[in-house]
Amino acid sequence: MQSLLRTPLDLPGQAAVAAAAAAAPSVFNTQPWSFSVSPAGLDVYADPGRASLPTASAERDVHLSCGAAVLNARAALARLGHGTRVSVLPDAGDPLLVARITVTDEAPDQVLGRLYGWVHLRRTNRYPFAPEPLASEVVALLRDAASREGASLRLLDREPEYQRVLSLIRAATGKEEEAVREDRAARLSPGSAPSVIPVGSLGPVPRRGGYDDPAVRDMAEGIGLPGRTCADFEPRPDLAVLETPGDDPASWVAAGQSLQRLLLTAAEHAVAASFANQPLEDADLRDAVSASAAHYGHPQMVLRIGYPLTQPPASPRRPLSEALRRDGD
Ligand SMILES: Cc1cc2nc3c(=O)[nH]c(=O)nc-3n(C[C@H](O)[C@H](O)[C@H](O)COP(=O)(O)O)c2cc1C
């Protein structure tokens, strides 16, 4: 990688940037990436083998996760005072090279530099939120954060649309294949690799009232795990869909960067999110999420957003040294 810099990234800076990338959210905390860091910047590679999930969305979810890592690395570089240039999928001969982030002498993105303060504090929050709806100013900030990276955040604020997506979330949960559930059970079982989703991060089991399921996704649905309590969730969470105009690997990376920029913005405003992506993991139901007369975007994430009442524990990451590529990898 060639440096565009008079002041290249020093070793502590390289470590901070790689650690920020590794703190990104990822599908099922699989961390499907590896990094090559140098004085010139950071390359993010996809590692699909880490996220071999039996869902229709596996490839997309790997790119979304890597996109979130790219945004975190950019935020760390901005905090260190560097401008950055990002090339997404820069090498047609190496589709696993998701993005190359090169440090430049241009002015850093000040907003991203500020958002870096939330990179290691943000959590996916699967605990109940306060019942209040999001303030319209917060919605505007989140929309703006998403659109800066090329995606749009569609808040489901019209009742028929809200109910339609909610019913797709329920349908997806009901139709989940045995193989998907078994894969999840294997990943979550006590004694599996430690870097998955610990019980404390799963949040409580949503208390069911009839079949009026809350829109929080129980990642351990149908899997009996010791140590989990039940709780009532907010009756009508704000739901939103993150959409992109295209639906190819570059669009998924953009969606991941948008997702992470909006999640860091949310954290800055004491707002949290969890996800209800089950309908996007099934090809037919995903089409139905996007089928709407007014919107033609491709749905990439379904978010539940609200004011948290609990700060969940951090979900662990594998040691950074395992995510760093050595020469020759
Ligand atoms: C592409 C993608 C899909 C995800 N889907 C879901 C989901 O459907 N439900 C959920 O609760 N979390 C979902 N997550 C969140 C991850 O499980 C979470 O990022 C991971 O466990 C690490 O935890 P953290 O975000 O608290 O650091 C998703 C994350 C990504 C990037």
Image (cartoon, helix red, strand yellow):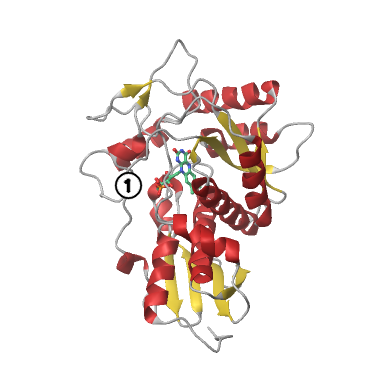
Q: Which residue is mark 1?
A: 196
Dot 1 falls on a residue whose secondary structure is: loop
Q: Position of residue 196 (x, y in %)?
A: 32, 47
Above or below: residue 230 compared with residue 295: above
Q: What residue is at 50 percent from the left and 82 percent from the top? A: 40
For the residue with label 1, is its CB less than 8 Å from the closest atom of ligand 1? yes
Any part of residue 329 in sight: no
Any part of residue 260 in sight: yes
Q: Position of residue 5 (x, y in %)?
A: 56, 86
Residue 100 location, quadrant: bottom right
Above or below: residue 225 compared with residue 6: above
The amino acid on which the numbered mark 1 sits, given as a three-letter code, is Val
Q: Position of residue 251 (x, y in %)?
A: 65, 55
Name the residue at the left extreme: 191
Q: Where, quadrant-wise, is the C terminus in this rendering?
A: bottom left
Q: What residue is at 46 percent from the left and 81 percent from the top? A: 9
Q: What residue is at 54 percent from the left and 23 percent from the top? A: 171
**Could you classify mark 1 by the number of other residues whose Cα lies within 10 Å: few (under 14), some (14-19), or many (20 or more)?**
some
| Residue nearest the viewer, comparing 54 with 264 | 264
Residue 312 location, quadrant: top left
| Residue nearest the viewer, comparing 234 with 90 | 234
| Residue nearest the viewer, comparing 100 with 248 | 100
Q: Position of residue 214 (x, y in %)?
A: 48, 22
Q: How many marks?
A: 1
